[in-house]
Image: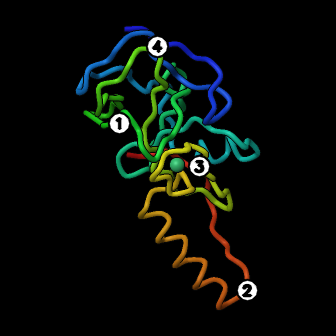
Amino acid sequence: MGLIIRSSAIHAAGCYTTTRIPKGKRIAEYTGPRISKDEADVLYEDSPITYLFGLGDGTVVIDGHCAAMFINHSCDPNCETSEVKGRVWITAIKNIAAGAEITYDYCLYDGGDDEATCNCGSQNCRGTMYSRHEVRQRKAAARAESQKTGKPAVSGRRKKAR
Ligand SMILES: [Zn+2]
């Protein structure tokens, strides 16, 4: 199995497989230093792009430094992520053809005023990389806030999560 990084139609760079991958195979680990959410917020305060992956309850994040950090989001992904004893694995949920781009659903949360627009192009695209739960929360927060001030206010940075 070989993973390569090259330009992608979804977003600047993507992660591709050079060989066929069978459904159920673990293909990569999301690795990098573990830092606290608060450290990440300071470190990336002015950075539009982060490669943070939220662990557990979200108080610790992995600051991605690996091939897996280039894997793009899709609303119709061919992989999923799972956290096992503090390590994050990317596993195929479909048979993946050689040459295909590897994707998983980012299920973003904690994204501030970032729209996190999705360009995955899949038929069931939900238009955003936020999780369905986060989309519901944001709508509720925006409604509550607009009743007070007339504009939405949410704080924090966006993270990837299962
Ligand atoms: Zn999409």
Given the image, on which type of amino acid does mark 3 rest?
Cys
The residues bearing labels 2 and 3 have C-alpha atoms spaced at a distance of: 26 Å
Q: Earlier in the sequence, mark 3 or mark 1?
A: 1
Distance (Cα) linking label 4 and label 2: 47 Å
User: What's the amino acid at mark 2?
Assistant: Gly
Q: Which residue is mark 4?
A: 3
Callout 3: SS: loop
* Colour convention of the picture: rainbow
* Residue pictured at 54% horizontal, 75% vertical: 139
**Which residue in the structure is indicated by mark 3?**
118
Camera-side residue of 30 and 46: 30
The secondary structure type at the circle numbered 1 is strand
Residue kind at label 4, given as amino acid type: Leu
Identify residue for label 1: 81
Q: Earlier in the sequence, mark 4 or mark 2?
A: 4
Q: Of the residues tagged 2 and 3, which is closer to the observer? A: 3
* Residue that protrudes farthest toward the bottom in the picture: 147
Q: Dot 2, how many residues are within 10 Å of its Cα: few (below 14), some (14-19), or many (20+)?
A: few
